[in-house]
């Protein structure tokens, strides 16, 4: 059979970008791009829909930096919808779900709370969430007896409060007029629903490149599957204002995925992205199903074992290139998902044909990713795992797992019958997302300068690859030296 063997597959480490003629100033560079037909971000980065990467905190941080998070789906519909809600309501610096303290708590406990969350005061609520008062540093500073109860020193109701849904301008005016730093937001029953602080306004000014929707709220996406109540999940997410849905599976070139994309599209006002595929035909099938964006990557993920367990996959640069041939012709943006190890891989993905990239391991170590810090031999780590790992697919206690159908294993029987396609591990702690993104986007801007592309489309058009050998790869990394000082954007993997 003449075409039994497809062309040679290349990945990030197989290629480098050629330097091209460049006459631009660094501040002319525009990194904005489309993740799907109608959703634009200011930096071409998405955080992965994985339970150790993207929950509301990461999604908020990503959108503030100008990218977007895709909320994972290994949780109940109600919980995932709540996460969308948290992101959409975090606009103009409002805190939903603020930290609160019970009136019977001691000042010592209130102190600990303030220290832990680095806040200067806490609303006091009863068990039903009703706002009773507020206790701030000023109330507590002159109390020497730390065993006294919060109720004895708090500033009790009536306080200056705002109604849920108050505009940023009105909230700021109330803070200014009453010379207060915190404005609790309550519903008609007096139940605390949020908190606006002066500090948060400052924060809003701190994120001028935030990726926002038409109403000025942060952008957020969310993943759904194909089995069970996936369609109901999509509806619930759309209901609370998600900006796009990702039909997120390990094999997007399957009828189930195309059907689900088409079904959600048929009456949705939001963009629907399908994936993952790794071939031109796979991308074409999703285009035909009506997808607004196509996610590419079968097996490149750092935690993925699909290529060894099933022998399936396409090295990622070739996969992106092939999929983009079908997607570009239809005007559908491409997301290059998985396998990126360094900032330089972002530009390589874009030149291959991606419009944005999705990151797992590069972001799993951030402060904002779910999970506790682990200390091992004096070093700090965070756990990270594939959604097809045993841990992610197993249901534990009353927590049902929803990630089995990503690997089409919904009906395999008991958890002991699962065929994992991912592993569990840990990555070094990397500090706040802002610092990590600064390095990633800084690297991308350098790439754009070297290639001579002011915008992502220009980079895509002008970029050319040179294929390299293992000797070339060895030369690319630091060599013939023992690294003594860690760089913020380089470690030997
Ligand atoms: P990486 O950035 O290389 O860590 O890859 C992240 C990507 O890996 C995810 O966005 C997803 O497409 C894929 N993934 C997630 N779980 C698994 C698995 O268990 N095999 N793979």
Image (cartoon, grey):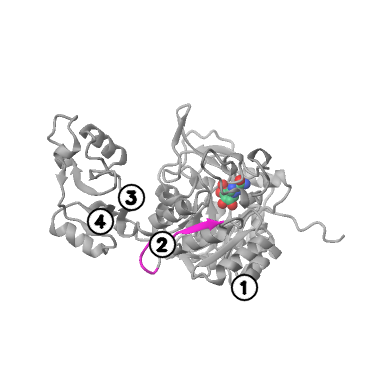
Q: Of helix, strand and loop, which one carries label 3?
A: loop
The question of residue 220 being in magenta is answered with: yes
Q: Is residue 461 visible?
A: no
Q: Nearer the viewer, residue 406 or 358?
A: 406
Q: Nearer the viewer, residue 55 or 475?
A: 55
Q: Earlier along the polypeptide chain: callout 1 or callout 2?
A: 2
Q: Give the Cα separation between the discs numbered 1 and 4.
A: 52 Å
Q: Residues within 10 Å of mark 4 (few under 14, many from 20)?
A: few
Q: Nearer the viewer, residue 17 or 77?
A: 77
Residue 312 in the image, given as x and y percentages of width and height: 72, 50
Left or right of residue 470: residue 361: left
Q: Of helix, strand and loop, which one carries label 4?
A: loop
Q: Give the Cα separation between the discs numbered 4 and 3.
A: 16 Å
Q: Earlier along the polypeptide chain: callout 4 or callout 3?
A: 3
Q: Give the Cα separation between the discs numbered 1 and 2.
A: 25 Å
Q: Give the Cα separation between the discs numbered 2 and 3.
A: 22 Å
Q: Give the Cα separation between the discs numbered 1 and 3.
A: 42 Å
Q: Is residue 357 above or below residue 387?
A: below
**Which of the two discs, 1 and 3, sits closer to the camera?**
3
The question of residue 216 being in magenta is answered with: yes
**Which of the two discs, 1 and 4, sits closer to the camera?**
4
For disc 1, the marked residue is 330
The secondary structure making up most of the magenta span is: loop
Q: Earlier along the polypeptide chain: callout 1 or callout 4?
A: 4
Q: Earlier along the polypeptide chain: callout 2 or callout 3?
A: 3
**Which of the two discs, 2 and 4, sits closer to the camera?**
4
Callout 2–callout 4 Cβ contact below 8 Å: no
The quadrant of the image that shows the C terminus is top right
For disc 3, the marked residue is 97
Span colored in magenta: 214-224
Q: Give the Cα separation between the discs numbered 2 and 4.
A: 34 Å
For disc 2, the marked residue is 211
């Amino acid at each position: 059979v003449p075409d039994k063997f497809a062309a040679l597959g290349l990945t990030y480490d197989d290629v480098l970008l050629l330097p091209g003629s460049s006459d631009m100033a660094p501040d002319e560079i525009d990194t904005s791009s489309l993740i799907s037909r109608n959703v634009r971000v200011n930096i071409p980065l998405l955080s992965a829909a994985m339970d150790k990467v993207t929950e509301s905190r990461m999604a908020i941080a990503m959108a503030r930096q100008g990218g977007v998070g895709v909320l994972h789906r290994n949780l109940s519909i109600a919980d995932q919808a709540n996460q969308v809600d948290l992101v959409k309501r975090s606009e103009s610096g409002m805190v939903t779900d603020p930290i609160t303290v019970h009136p019977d708590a001691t000042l010592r406990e209130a102190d600990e709370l303030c220290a832990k969350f680095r806040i200067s005061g806490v609303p006091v609520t009863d068990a039903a969430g009703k706002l009773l008062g507020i206790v701030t540093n000023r109330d507590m500073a002159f109390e020497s007896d730390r065993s006294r109860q919060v109720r004895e020193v708090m500033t009790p109701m009536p306080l200056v409060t705002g109604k849920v849904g108050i505009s940023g301008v009105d909230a700021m005016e109330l803070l200014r007029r009453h010379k207060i730093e915190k404005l609790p937001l309550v519903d008609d029953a007096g139940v605390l629903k949020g908190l606006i602080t002066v500090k948060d306004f400052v924060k809003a000014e701190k994120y001028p490149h935030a990726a926002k929707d038409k109403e000025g709220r942060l952008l957020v996406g969310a993943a759904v599957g194909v089995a069970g109540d996936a369609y109901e999940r999509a509806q619930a997410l759309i209901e609370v204002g998600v900006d796009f849905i990702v039909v997120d599976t390990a094999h997007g070139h399957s009828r189930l995925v195309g059907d689900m994309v088409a079904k959600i599209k048929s009456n949705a006002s939001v963009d629907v992205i399908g994936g993952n595929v790794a071939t031109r035909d796979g991308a074409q099938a999703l285009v035909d199903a009506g997808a607004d964006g196509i996610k590419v990557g079968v097996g490149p993920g750092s935690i993925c074992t699909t290529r060894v367990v099933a022998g399936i996959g396409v090295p990622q640069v070739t996969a992106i290139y092939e999929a983009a041939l079908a997607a570009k012709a239809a005007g559908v943006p491409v997301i290059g998902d998985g396998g990126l190890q360094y900032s330089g891989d972002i530009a390589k993905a874009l030149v291959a044909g991606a419009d944005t990239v999705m990151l797992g391991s590069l972001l799993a170590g951030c402060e904002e990713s779910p999970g506790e810090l682990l200390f091992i031999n004096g070093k700090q780590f965070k756990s990270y795992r594939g959604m097809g790992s045993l841990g992610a697919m197993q249901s534990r206690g009353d927590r049902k797992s929803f990630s089995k159908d990503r690997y089409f294993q919904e009906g395999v029987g008991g958890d002991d019958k699962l065929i994992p396609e991912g592993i569990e591990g840990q990555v070094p702690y990397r500090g706040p997302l802002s610092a990590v993104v600064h390095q990633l986007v800084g690297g991308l801007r350098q790439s754009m300068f070297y290639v001579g592309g002011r915008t992502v489309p220009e980079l895509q058009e002008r970029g050319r690859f040179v294929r390299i050998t293992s000797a070339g790869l060895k030369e690319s990394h630091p060599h013939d030296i023992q690294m003594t000082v860690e760089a913020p954007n380089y470690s030997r993997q």
